[in-house]
Amino acid sequence: MAYYAFLSAMDNLKRFLRSSDYFNLSPEIVSIYGELDSMRYLLSNYNRMKGRKLRVNPLLEQQIEDLAEEFADLIEPFLQTAASDNEDEDEVDEDSDPMEYFLQQSYEVKNPNTLSPESMDLLRQLISLLEKFSLEVQNMKEEKITDDGMVVSSRMICRCECEPVGLEEEIRLLMDWVVGGPEELLTMAVVGMAGIGKTTLVEQVYNHPSIQSIFDTKIMILVGPNFVENEFLQLLVDHIEGEGKHKKFTNMQELRMHLRGLMGIRRYLIVLEDVWSTRTWFSVDNYFPTGCKKSRIILTSRMLDMTYSVRFQRKCFLDEDDSWKLLHRIVFTSSEESCSFKLEKIGKKIAKNCEGLPLAIVSIGRLLRNVEKTVEYWKKVSEDGNPLGIGVDDNSYITRSLLLSYDMLHHYQKLCFLYAGVFPQSFVIFASELIRLWGMEGFNCAYRYDSCWVLNELISASVVLVQEYSSTTWTPKICRVHYVFRNLCISIAEKEKFCHVLNKYTYCFPRGTNHQPRLCTHNNVMLAIEEVRATMESISSIRSLLCLGPYRPYPMRIHLSFTLLKILNAPNIRFYTFPYQILNLVRLKYITITYNGEIPKSISKLQKLQVLIVDRHVIIKSLEDVCYLPVEIWNLKQLRHLQCSGFDLPDPCTDQTFLLHLKTLSGVSARSCTRGVLARLPKLKKLGIHIVLGQNEKENFSFFGDIADMNLDLSSLKCVVWGFHTQVISEFRTFPSSCKKIALSGCRLPWKCMKVFRGALHILKLRRNAFCGPMWEPVLGDFLNLEYLLLEDLDMEVWGANSRHFPTLKHLIIRHCYKLREIPIDFGNIRSLRTIEVEDCRPSVGTSAKKIQKNHQEQFVNKHLHVHIHSSWDDKKN
């Protein structure tokens, strides 16, 4: 991946220049940087196109990549990670808003103004190779690439193979919009990822018999990514008047005025297929008069940001039943053919593997239709992670369609997308964790863009999907990459030397693996094979080791002597003894492991460590089982995120010891919440406490009061108490007003303590007797900013509140509160209220929720309050 290696080298060189005294820099260094920077555009364009008709000598590419990586590694020791000047960024947990987190880094140079002779020589060689590269590109005849036939092919597949499946409701909604509504011009965007069936859906409406006589003019036209405004407008005129029946306009203004005149006297239905940006839409929107006649425009697009400017209908994935129905129709085209019970069972698994994507189902259906229908073959297909052979060198329609989405990404988006795409299907990708890893990897977005914004861009481009939204912030919490894109990402990552994916022993380490900067395992058992470990020992280029296969209960020996390693992400590998090899990896910035023993003192050798996550693989029975982290942990000055379940942070040895950049501390017990510890974490934003009490333990904790007295600038607090039914947390009078999110469980505090949680609180989660007592009577003015309230497994009977207590409440969730009689009916007067969820409570609670919904609709006609009531008892009856 020469381009990305080049960018890494350029970033290191730029940080060197920025940290140096410009006036004392060597003129040659400044000149070299200018020459290299001028090559960036050439490499960027080549990188975008090389998967098609354009390909430079692979040996030259490899030489550029090797030199760039060698220079980046050589100069990095001269750069010392320093504290960010911007201390407003917060670490995030899996429930938090990822938009809160962005890890910025600044750098200090140990020896400013000079580079070693070896580094300078590498830069000169790199420029020489890039000049050769430039000549080769200029001498090549690049074929013009067009995607005009792509959408036509999509229509043919979906229309000719069989009748569409699972579109009934979507067709009805779109039809109602096209036929009904107000007199003025309306625009609708149908959005979704490649192959999801946007064109098929729109064609069902466009060709529907009931609208044939409604419109004077109907046009369905491909826009595509290579939009040229004057050609597009001329094509519209040709469609309306007939090609050759009007003059060819050379003046754009005349063409625009002529088109507006044509559209102003017609009732028209126009479908603009495959629109790639809001800029494209804005450039043509003015040509359509907004007067009467009920004209309609439908856009189809992969870009979700189209929804910001027009009304939209998102094209959904098929469910499992409709997926199998579509596959069956494609495979069994003759009424004489039948599907046996065994084939149906396997076929449903094949359909499910397509994850609801119609184009994937149609493609796999054509494959199964054209071969002998045997149980053995179908079983082989069902177990194949890539039965369609999707890859960067594949020329099938589905691959070309996916590659177009990939090619349209910017280079920084491609890096982040490829990284997400190599994660295995079974791995839960938390948005917060993915963003944190991007920052640790040092991708370009970590310096030029907000990484959280990059995730939103990938979601908007329909290449990353949101599997679950945060219940509190309604931002992406868990994301995923569709299996077709995942196969494409793995193929590109392997070919571009971005990452090697280890899955099957028959395809372990092909030629060229020794140049891969990342190794990702989908099957952790592979690491236990002696031959695999031996091969891993010969790879010196690995900078990131991602062990993401399913959790295994038995221990494994893995090779961890990669001298350049910066990231070790092995949450599902169980270590019985501490992997001492990692203590020699002084470049490590990120560690996630599962380990039950003591952390060695020598962990302090990892001076660049910023993220340390250690989970214990046994249940902690009581406070006596909790062990301390070594006091040397205080020497890790760059530490920002410390998550150590079952471990505690000890008091520092001296009063001058601080962790100046630590923002997240979670998994610790109350022993880590002493004044001596908390006073030395000046940037702490998020605190997670777990207290486990044994039968004979009688502890009383006062850390809430300590936190309040110290006036810590916390934004999030989580406290979970497990043990006997006694109150173990002392009552307290105040709490930091900066705290926006509080989650409590098992604390058994009296309701009178609730009055201290006031100020900026936006999110409050109370679980498992967090507060106890039959009545909660809030105090007016305490919850003026509260937007999200969860009440779960509480013994409260009466809730003495009204709308004035929670004036900004948006979401109310009540679960397993078996004694609660009702929700205050006056909540129907809360203008901001959007959802009420009731699960496994008295019927009277659900009844009150419905009354609130009715009152809310009467009070605020244009506001929509959604009420969801669920009972496990009803599930059992069904």
Image: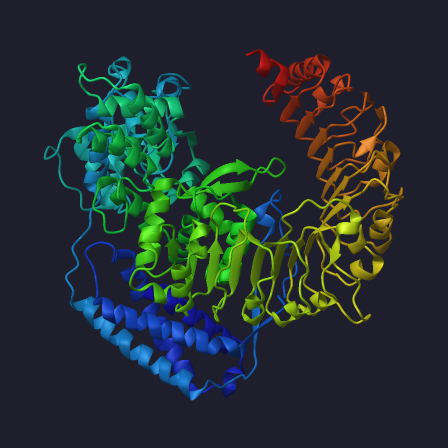
Residue lying furthest left: 244
Rendered location of residue 90, percent (x, y): 64, 54
In this image, 356 relative to 336: left or right?
Answer: right
State the residue at coordinates (38%, 76%): 34
Rendered location of residue 572, percent (x, y): 53, 49
Residue 414 visible in this rendered orientation of the protein: yes
Q: In the picture shown, does residue 432 fall above or below 825? A: below
| Coloration of the structure image | rainbow
Residue 206 visible in this rendered orientation of the protein: no
Q: In the picture shown, does residue 2 fall above or below 725? A: below
State the residue at coordinates (66%, 30%): 810
- Picture quarter containing residue 734? top right
Total marks in image: 0
Front-lying residue, 262 or 683 = 683
Q: In the picture shown, does residue 177 fall above or below 290? A: above
- Picture quarter containing residue 377? top left
Rendered location of residue 77, percent (x, y): 52, 77
Rendered location of residue 359, percent (x, y): 29, 33
In this image, 807 relative to 4: left or right?
Answer: right
Q: Quadrant of the C terminus?
A: top right
State the residue at coordinates (68%, 17%): 849
In this image, 143 relative to 427: left or right?
Answer: left
In this image, 94 relative to 373: left or right?
Answer: right
Front-lying residue, 130 or 427 = 427
Q: Quadrant of the N terminus?
A: bottom left
Front-lying residue, 110 or 386 = 386
State the residue at coordinates (21%, 33%): 367
- Picture quarter containing residue 72? bottom left
